[in-house]
Amino acid sequence: MLTQITLERFKCFNRLCMPLKPLTLIAGTNGAGKSSIIQALLLVRQSCKDKDYDWKQYVVINGGLVDLEDAGKLLYINAEGNDSDIVLNLENDDMDEITFHITPKQEKTTARCKAEGDLENAKNEWSLFSDDFVYLYADREQPRGKYMMTSETRLDSRLGNRSASNAAFLMASEINNNKDIRITGLKHVHATDNTVRRNVSAWISHIMGDQVSITATETEKDKEARLDYSIFNKNGVEQQLSPLNMPFGHSYILPVILAVLTAPAGSMILVENPESHLHPGAQLRMGEFLSLASACGVQIIIETHSDHLMNGIRLSCRKGIISPEDVEMDLIGLDTDGYTHIRRPVQLNPDGTVKNLVPGFFDEWEKALTSLLS
């Protein structure tokens, strides 16, 4: 498990040192720097996986996981001197660490770097570089009547590219092979067995607040797949619908749920905006679901704008689903000087209440309510 990331002179940060826990929630306003933290992790992973360049000497700026355009644009705008390197440092729970000193020359595709630490061990042992790693971009695959297989790359996860382009094919494969969820602790109470199919259906129903069953089939081997949702009327009569005739949110949460239920313990998932296209109650239940997954051994890092999802995590602490010591919440934003980007940690009590009130951390409703009542 990764335990800390440190960035120096990287994009909007002069220096950022942030702990990483089993469940890490990164919040902040637009442009605060949340995505830069995720991008730093993806930059290191895609450099590790690239066959054309040695990541001991080069980092890959433009790739399938993240496109940062030009190495020269990565340098912190207020960096002093002409020879300032960008530094990315990662630590894991074995007290190992790797560091990249990146030369911010204006070069496309790659940037030269000097790497420190046991990169070979990290490549083979760290969850960030494992084949079980999943990254889900904020803009995920939209509802379709049929899904076409995308060509695979070394950076694809079991769900396809970062938009989960092949999620329907993974679902079909899991069903065809009658596969069970990888962590039995994630079995939903209403699922009649441990199969991925029944648990995906149960968790979608739970989070979305309806009663659905989902199935997937490959209509043309390795080329075309189809998802079908079954809904039931008051008499129990079933009707099948394609994703095009289902709420948009079902398609957006399917990759998140499928990624979790096919993840082995010790793996890592990065999710941007897991709350996308969900109503508030569903966002809250998504927070509880991700909390449970983290408590069961999957390290999850979330970038979010949702106070409802955050409250789902807080409720999970109160219910004993996850310990507050296993949750890292950080508000990323500007310091009082108006240009330095910093992190403000938010600490939780076992009952889910916040130990330290951090101005700007999902407090818009309180501000609005105060204005309405004044």
Image: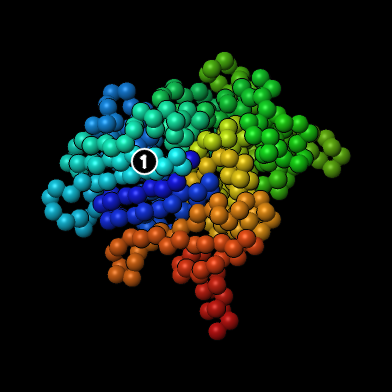
Seen from this angle, which residue lies furthest right? Answer: 235
Residue with the most extreme front position: 95
User: Within 10 angstroms of label 1, few (less than 14), some, or many (20 or more) residues?
Assistant: some
- Residue at image location 33% in from the left, 44% down from the top: 89
Above or below 71: residue 47 = above
Q: Position of residue 230 (x, y in %)?
A: 73, 34
Q: Is residue 55 visible?
A: yes
- The amino acid type of the residue labelled 1 equals Glu
Which quadrant does the C terminus fall into?
bottom right
Q: Nearest the camera: 248 or 155?
A: 155
Left or right: 128, with 318 as reference point: left
Q: Label 1, on which residue?
A: 97
Q: Where residue 90 appears, x then y in whole percent? A: 37, 43
Observer-nearest residue: 57 or 161?
57
Give the residue at x 55% y 54%.
325
Classify residue 213 by image quadrant: top right
Where is residue 119 shown, x and y percent of the image? 34, 32
